[in-house]
Amino acid sequence: MAFLDVRPDLAAGHEPFGRIMAAVKGLAPGESLELVAPFEPVPLYQVMEARGFTHATRRTSDGSWHVTFQRLMSEE
């Protein structure tokens, strides 16, 4: 599983979309990325679904959101 915490990017005023896409680019079918953000990244869900990912979301006691994006297994 890959891990990416975008809270520092957002706190510095940087858009993390490019880093997120780079992180998932190399994932093989069945592999996943755990993304940590200060808010629920709802717009990202549709983008990732279009790229063949499912997601599971949980909010932690510190108020951050942890979203696990998993690349769907290919049908071969």
Image (cartoon, rainbow, N blue to C red):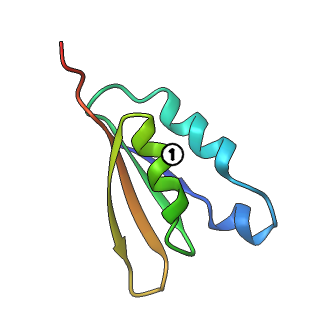
Mark 1 element type: helix
Label 1: how many Cα within 10 Å (few below 14, some 14–19, many 20+): few
Q: Amino acid at mark 1?
A: Val
Q: Position of residue 56 (x, y in %)?
A: 30, 60
Most distant residue in the right direction: 13
Q: Residue at x 19, y 19 (%)?
A: 75
Residue 44 x, y percent position in the rendering: 52, 54
Residue behind mark 1: 47
Q: Name which quarter of the figure residue 48 lies in.
A: top left
Residue 12's place in the image compared with 73, above or below, is below
| Residue extending furthest toward the top | 76
Instruction: Name the one closer to the observer, 39 or 64.
Output: 39
Total number of numbered labels? 1
Location of residue 33 in the rendering, given as x and y in whole percent from the top left corner: 41, 46
Which residue is found at the position 60% from the left and 35% from the top?
22
Answer above or below: position of 63 versus 25: below
Q: Residue at x 48, y 85 (%)?
A: 63
* Side of 4 where 72 appears, left or right: left
7 left or right, relative to 71: right
Which quadrant would residue 43 be assigned to in this image?
bottom right
Q: Is residue 73 above or below residue 5?
A: above
Closer to the camera in the image, 17 or 45: 45
Image quadrant occupied by the N terminus: top left
Q: Residue at x 61, y 60 (%)?
A: 6
Image quarter hosting the C terminus: top left
